[in-house]
Image (spheres, grey):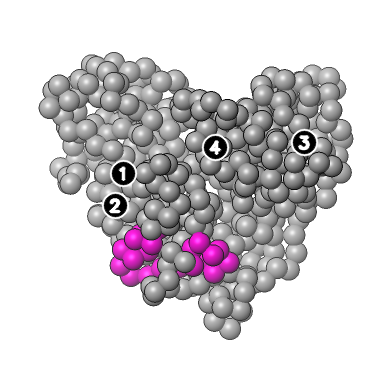
Amino acid sequence: MVDLSSAPRVHLLGVGGAGMSAIAVVLRGLGCRVSGSDAADTPVLDRLREIGVDVHVGHQASHVSGADIVARSTAVGDDNPEILAARQAGIPVYRRAEILTAITELRTTVAVAGTHGKTTTAAMLSHMLMAAGADPGYVVGAVLANGMIGARWSDSPLFVVEADESDGTFGELMVDWAVLTSVEPDHLRRDRPAEELEAEFARFCAGTANGLVVCADDRGAMQASQGGNRVLYGTGPEADYRWRLVSRSRESTVGEVIRRGELIGPVTVPMPGDHNALNATGALAMACELGVDQSQAAGALAGFRGVTRRFEHRGKAAGVDFVDDYAHLPTEVACALKAASDGGWNRVVCVFQPHRYTRTSQLWESFAHCFEGADEVIVTDIYSAGEPPIPGVSGELIWQGVKEAHPDWDVSYVAGLEDVADILVSGLRPGDLCLTLGAGDLTRLPDRVISRLSERQ
């Protein structure tokens, strides 16, 4: 086990990423001396410098000198010169999950887990608890909408953490309370078929000490949590916290939450999409189960400013709105497009960048029906996320599946982002929404297209 009680000097590899930068913020809050390194300079590194993290750009063996502990993200391999130097010097090297587990031991931990929705739900819950005066610490796996790193530390006994299932380590966390948003096939490997992923979620639920809040609308979440002492949220009559829609707009969703027959509301979710209304209901349910006044928690939600890449409005040019979203799984894509189609734009032009060769090889057929609501779809080539290519696997597989299922849909395959930018600049019209979806570098595309359209005006 990692001992953080002596406020050691900790060096973090991959410190610019969402997960490791959050760890750096918490460790600084604990009084640790923190250094870190990453391959490229980014605004996140500037934020870390501001709080006293000694940040290096590039990896060199000398960076670990004087460290008591070294921790690394999953993207950092064994051949990294800093890993090699740490091991040669006898400095313990830990995974991010082991550091996070040690942090969860220090507080009453509320974990938010699920294949999708966990980032937004964790951020909403943290916001509600802050507004109610609970002053929680938190770790959210994304940059917040105000540009801040998604983490803080406090003296409060409460700590909210986004529990990531991608590498199976979410089961190591010491969890007192948990929210489970969804369970669907993702992050599958030969040694981790869908059945094993489902079993991991079931073990996570069984290991939650005090209480579990589960989305009743998600079959996988209900299956994983069966037999446990759970509180349900959703849209059906079985939900202890039931969402009832009142109205939708481009900017928000308004509804009511009925808590075991008692009305809480109205509730304004400052994000479009029924899926975000469900995320808000799950966060509200957990806040109430933790003892927060229900009216205060519901009222606080209207001031939530969001998370980057979660239906994030990126700008407007030549009468075209640009929204960017992290959606990269079939259900997430369908939810984002449903929110877009409810927004009243003349057309929804969707650009989708598949993420990882392994994911695409396993799930490409599942994307066949998820682009309903888009007037035009462009599928790009795969963002590898560091994976080696798999022969025969490209974004063209997804294009092929969609086209075979819906031959009348306007769907094209354009491998390179520069070519996609050219198509958008020439083809977008006033009143359109350009919606970029994916977990890779597609997020840079809106700025490029906005800049080029602005130059033409």
Q: Secondary structure at mark 3?
A: strand
Give the residue type at disc 3. Answer: Val
Asked whether the residues under the numbered discs 1 and 2 touch, taking CB atoms below 8 Å apart as contact, a structural biologist would say yes
Comes first in the chain, label 1 or label 2: 1
Please tell me which residue is depicted at 38% across the width and 19% down the height of the picture: 57
Mark 4 surroundings: few (<14), some (14-19) or many (≥20) residues within 10 A:
some
- Camera-side residue of 197 and 322: 197
- Camera-side residue of 88 and 293: 88
Residue 60 in which image quadrant: top left
Q: Secondary structure at mark 2?
A: helix
Label 1 vs label 2: CA separation? Answer: 7 Å
Give the residue type at disc 1. Answer: Ala
Circle number at residue 411: 3
Q: Which residue is mark 1?
A: 97
Q: Is residue 292 visible?
A: no
Provide residue 388's location: percent of width, then percent of height.
Answer: 46, 25
Q: Secondary structure at mark 1?
A: helix
